Amino acid sequence: MKPEIDKTLTELRHYIGERNLPNDSDLLGIFGRTLVNCFSFMDKNLLSIGCAVYLAASIFDNNCTPNCFVTFSGLKVEVRSLINMPDLDLAKCYISYTDVISTSAARREVLYKGWFFLCECKTCLDEERAKYENSIKCEISNCQGIVSLPEASDTVQQIKLKIKAAREREEKRREKEKEGEGRRKWRREEGKKYSGDEGKEKTKDKEVNGEERNEVEAPRCSVCGWTPSSEKLKQYWNTVAFTKKQLKAMDQNNLNIEYCLQTLEKLTNFSPRNAWKVKILDLSFNAAILNSCWSLALKYGEENLDGMRFYYSDNSPVLSLFLFNLGKAKIYLKEFREGLHILEEAELFLTTGLGTSHPLVEELHQLTLLANEDREICLERWSTATKKDEKRQLHQVHSSGDEALAKIFATLNQISHSSPQNLSGV
């Protein structure tokens, strides 16, 4: 954090001058409030191009499965609801502060370091979801099971201890502000109480840790029971560490496709829903699109479709944007029919999350028109419309009660659909 502050100070001195800078204490307070309350400013492709502070929008709390989405119209921020809300209650409107494609431990660590709270949302506490976040494929042939690996670090426990220590420091600070005999008396009583509780907590912690050690079992395949060796486990966590390092080095706005592919080669034994593999596949997909490698984009997009659906809810505009790009890749590669189906799925929540006038929504409509110009799709649409019209006319004739006309119309309809060989002599 200190290097980042020093860098910011250097830039501020350059642009506004030393004389206009506040004192160090005020500047640090301004810097901290900006970091906590700022929004990632995005362009029309939802790529971050900076950060901005919006005081009114900073009231929204975090949830790793949000019901609202933040977008921008010029310099104006828009917070759009993704669900129907009969009664608007801002306390029940949630946005996501971080990318949800991550393990719960890593995500909670980011939230604690950036916003100073331990997330206790339903997604972070979902044990079924956690089984896939760090998982590898079973190596037994023809087995489709996965091996769930427990998180190597006790990040959550460390965060809880830090929060507890911070609260204790705050209590001690308040104690020092009190004066007189009442203060000294209160401190003596609190000191006795604290020392007693601390002993109990230490004993309890030992018991809990002992239970956890007894309950921990060797990771096994969920289907056949195959157990990976210690070397496999070590290799996995080394690969995860390498992946984290690569992610830090990557620039979201200028993705290096070679870095993505090099990282992806090391993740071959990761399961399709492994959080780190889904993340790297998504970056590879975006890198291929930025470099106009549509064949590669289609390959990685189709491979990652199940993983993206797993980590994002159906109404997520981020998932809809992924589907939009996947549909675009199919249309550019002349797979019009499948591309249209994917664009239709993406349209609803992309429009809900971004608005009808957003450039991405307008581009989606243009792609839909382009795909509909395909000859086979035009003929299919014309044939479907013709059959519907014929059925409607038959229904009208039958409903009129004129059976003779109905028979004549049915005969003519049958003749019109007969092959040329069957029409000789008619």
Image (spheres, helix red, strand yellow):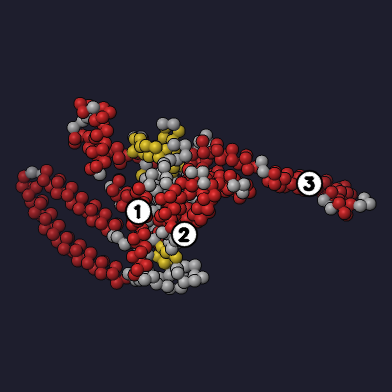
Residue at 47% x, 37% y is 44
Instruction: Please give the name of the residue rendered at 29% of the width and 68% of the height, measured from the top-left corner.
Output: 212
The residue at 25%/57% (across/down) is 158
- Cα separation, mark 1 vs mark 2, equals 18 Å
* Residue 337 vs residue 96, the one in the foreground: 337
Closer-to-camera residue (129/43) = 43
Whether label 3 touches label 2, CB < 8 Å: no
Q: Do the residues labelled 1 and 3 touch (CB within 8 Å)?
A: no
* Residue wearing tag 3: 390
Apparent side of residue 52 relative to residue 158 in the rendered image (left or right): right
- Location of residue 74 (image quadrant): top left
Disc 1: which residue: 244
Say above or below: 12 vs 418. Answer: above
Identified by mark 3, the residue type is Glu
Residue 310 in the figure: left or right of residue 396 = left
Q: What element carries label 1?
A: helix
Q: Where is residue 193 in the image (x, y as percent from the top left)?
A: 14, 58
Query: Which mark, residue 272?
Result: 2
Quadrant (top left, top right, bottom left, bottom right) of the N terminus:
top left
Residue 98 x %, y %? 37, 47
Q: Is residue 317 toward the left or the right of residue 394 in the image?
A: left
Comparing labels 1 and 3, the label whose residue is closer to the camera: 1
Q: Is mark 2 on a helix, strand or loop?
A: loop
In the picture as drawn, the residue positioned furthest to the bottom comes out as 225
Residue type, mark 2 in image: Pro
Measured in 3D between alpha carbons, the distance from the residue under mark 1 to the one under mark 3, in whole angstroms, is: 61 Å
Determine crowd level at label 2: few under 14, some 14-19, many 20+ residues with C-alpha closer than 10 A: many
Q: Nearer the viewer, mark 3 or mark 2?
A: 2
Q: Earlier in the sequence, mark 3 or mark 2?
A: 2
Q: Is residue 343 visible?
A: no
Query: Looking at numbered disc 1 in the image, what kind of residue is underneath it?
Result: Lys
**Foreground tag (1 vs 2):** 1
